[in-house]
Amino acid sequence: MGRTYIVEDVVEGYLTKQCEQTAGPVSGLLIGQSSTQREYVVTATRTPQREESTASGGNSPDKEWVTEHARQVSRMLPGGLSVLGVFIVTDTDAKDTLTTLRQLVFAVENLISSERLWTSAEDDVSDRVVLHVNPKTRKTLCRTFDVKDPKSVAKPADWKYQSGVCSSWSTVSCCVSVDVLLPLPDNPTATEDTAKCLKEGLRGWAHQLESAVCLIDGRRLAADAELAGGQKRNVRQTYSAQLLITPDERRLAEGVQRCGGSVSVSGAVYSTAYLHSNKPKARQAEKLLKRDAVSTLTTRAQMLLEELLTSGGASEGSSRDEHQREQFCLPHRVFCPVEASGPVCVCDYRFSDEGLSEVIDRLKEMLDMDAAEKDLDIRRETPAEVLEGDAADGRTKPTVETAEALQSKRNYFGAAMATTVALLATAASMLYLNDV
């Protein structure tokens, strides 16, 4: 028996729109939440048109372009949302298209999973969906592949439209304190080595976070306890959580490590997760919340690395003190609801020199969402500021996001990450990149 996909009816309307507008094959992503019993698809987004490909056309999607789009979209998905698979709208025979869809779904999963720092769980679903839509007949073919099995063959699946799929989903959120020391390579100017060291250092923090004690509404629930136990089911609920992290004794005992420098990250990140309304368990809420905390910190690290690479080590909104330490404002998280009536949101990351219009443009380009400024929730995280008075003495004031980097006598290259959230207004966020 194949898997069942419960699909928000707005996705049906979106796919119908693609059928009516398309002059050629259209590929895209299916976004939602997996569970052991069934899958929930809450939205879909087409792959942006690649400018240089408009003239050449062709009947096959650009695999590299589709996978890069999936990587960018994955960064914009809070806990509980993920890329469940891919779709294609084409009048090519469905059976002939399956090979292309199989290649796409495996390539997408391989790229997205390469950026994950959290450990897979036994109950993680490894099936990914592919959907073929014929624009002339409007017939759909739904199949799944096990992306953990390179020899996986297509399996049939049920594709069922339904209204209000995520209207009663629960929301769990918290603030997570961050205080980690990350070593840098002997040659900090080597960008690939620096990125690798930062990633490995954050992986250690991610493993520490996975063992944290999770309290939901001040209580530690049994893993198999229903999140809405004693409350009305299928009613939207909001929960406040805490993640209590203990020191990693193993890492403390490792002693001195030779390195070319170090990065100290401290502050707090805002984490949120959405859970389906079909008897969600406390274990699932904890897992998704922790994964979101890891993913959002990792995303900011990657974004700042990319920003510094693009700008050659300089950044808008940065300042340098008398000790040649550079301060950077880090991007903060902006949320936007998938539907006006539902609790489920996607997010984007906004640098201090960007306006809300740029967030709206990215939501349109990456997720094909027509958002307005009034739809954006900018209250959950405090925007960063550079305070000149605090640069010299190495202090930051509460509710400020900054990163400080000590410049090398050779060439400067550094990345900084930290955030301060409005809910944890007394936390100061700093990063020091020290040259040894």
Image: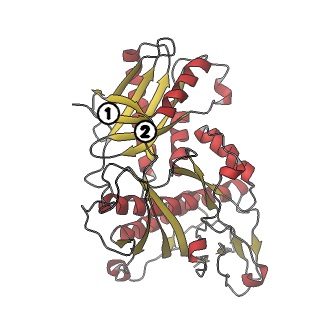
- The quadrant of the rendering that contains the C terminus is bottom right
Image side of residue 258 versus residue 325, left or right: left
Say few, some or many: other residues with alpha carbon within 10 Å of mark 2 (under 14 / 14 to 19 / 20 or more): many
Which of 36 and 325 lies nearest the eye of the viewer? 36
Circle 2 or circle 1, nearest the eye: 2
Q: Earlier in the sequence, mark 2 or mark 1?
A: 2
Image side of residue 211 versus residue 430, left or right: left
Residue 108 at x, y = what percent?
45, 39
SS at circle 2? strand
Q: Quadrant of residue 201?
A: bottom left
Identify the residue at image location x=26%, y=51%.
123
Q: Which residue is mark 1?
A: 145
Residue 134 at x, y = what percent?
47, 16
Identify the residue at image location x=43%, y=41%.
165
Whether residue 29 can be seen here: yes
Mark 2: which amino acid? Val
Q: Which residue is mark 2?
A: 41
Residue 214 at x, y = what percent?
36, 71
Identify the residue at image location x=31%, y=43%.
126
Mark 1: which amino acid? Phe
Q: From mark 2 to mark 1, how far is it between C-alphas?
A: 16 Å
Q: Quadrant of residue 319?
A: bottom right
Which of 336 and 208 lies nearest the eye of the viewer? 336
Residue 196 at x, y = what percent?
49, 60
Q: Is residue 63 above or below residue 190?
A: above
- The quadrant of the rendering that contains the N terminus is top left
